[in-house]
Amino acid sequence: MPVQVIMPKLTYEMLEGRVLEWLAAEGDEVAAGQTLFVVETDKASVEVPADEPGVLLKIITPVGETVPVSTVVAWIGRRGEVVPDTVPTLGLPAAALPVAAPTQPPALAAAGLAPARSGSEADVPASPIARRLARELGVDLSDVQAASGQPRVREADVQAFAEAQRVAQAVGPAAPPAAVLASRPEPAYELVHPTPLQRAMAQHMTQAAAIPQMAAAVDLDTSELERVRGELAPTWQTRFGYRPSYTHLFAVLVARVLVSQRALNASWTEAGIRFFSDVNLGVAMATERGLVVPVVRDAARGSLEGVAAEIVRLQRAAEANRLPPQDLEGGTFTMTNVGMLGISLSVPLLNPPQSGILAIGARREQVVLVDGQVVARPVLTVTLVADHRVADGAAVAGFLKSLKQLAEQPRATLGCGE
């Protein structure tokens, strides 16, 4: 008898996953434990192995489609076995899903856009995306089906119905249906469904914006850092195949500062403030699928070569969409190097539940006065944003002061000698 392949729950918060790639084709023999497909979750891209050996009889969920956890995405069995015509709905239990209570505004009913429901919402044929979107927007699928006239409700039908609701509320109960639909001409647009990663990022940033935050910045003279980079570059290129970057150097310096500046390596909880004994440094990285923040663990105890090698490994995995969830979890502080994009100043949002994030700006030449002489020096600006519930102004100033001292005299900390 054919065996179902389901969309697994790969992280605690995961409610849905998007199929990025099938690594076997219909008709292929697969072994138990062999990677079958790649899923994009709310955190990472994860390879999913086959639980059972056999032949991949049928792929139900194509590449690019997003489905809820526990949805049947394929069938595995013996060659020649027949796959059932109907796929059972396994989805998440209702208690595990964020459900918005359906509403029916008076303006919508008066406008004739909320026809009588023909039956239970659970009986309405609808795509998984449409069903999830209806929950988020607080509309009833029975109403959507009646208004659209479609036998199976699609995402576009839910969007159209929700927009009609919005316009009806704005225009008011006196307007007839035709006036409701024509009163607000919309410019042409393309509606793109966000990926699980984009949706998770949006929720995460909404959470971050609710935290009381403070920011402060300082300019660093990078003359000595540039000398260190220049001295190391030829040897590193030969031994490792890459050159040291500002990201590598600052990762070590920031991690060492956090050992003494505990308030920035901490997290606010209702039970109290957690001060972490290890520095697990999140390093923000831009990829084609969005921003990810993989974690360099115990960075304060690592050597420059070791920390750099780990950042390179994480960057390559991120670019290949092969970051496992464990590489994205457990960060205690985040660093983002916007200078590589030519940005001289950035004030980022916190990465909850962490209490601090540091943005590194682009290098620039700045005229300064040294011993009465006007000279040009390489300078960059670093900006620290902190959770003001955990770190006060003195703690923020102390962090920046210590970082400036280490960055302008970095050799001992980086293990480079004089």
Image: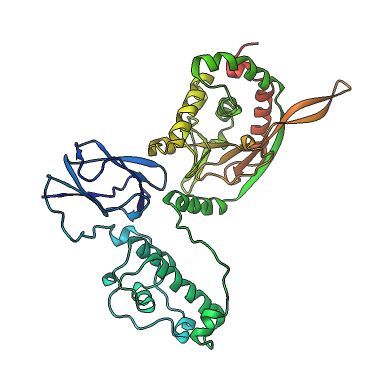
**Front-most of residues 239 and 292:** 239
Q: Is residue 15 visible?
A: no
Image position of 236 (left or right of 378): left
Task: Pinpoint residue 374: horizontal percent, then vertical percent.
Answer: 87, 25
Image position of 42 (left or right of 334): left
Q: How is the image coloured?
A: rainbow
Please state the total of marks drawn on the protein image.
0
**Front-most of residues 287 and 10:** 287
**Front-most of residues 253 and 194:** 194
Task: Pinpoint residue 202: horizontal percent, then vertical percent.
Answer: 50, 53
| Residue found at the far top of this picture | 418
Task: Pinpoint residue 70: horizontal percent, then vertical percent.
Answer: 27, 53
Task: Pinpoint residue 3: horizontal percent, then vertical percent.
Answer: 16, 48
- In the image, residue 18 sits, relative to residue 139, either above or below, namely above
- In the image, residue 101 sits, relative to residue 92, either above or below, namely below
Image position of 212 (left or right of 281): right
Residue 115 lies in quadrant: bottom left
Q: Is residue 307 visible?
A: yes
Residue displayed at 14% across by 46% down: 77
Looking at the figure, which quarter contains the C terminus? top right
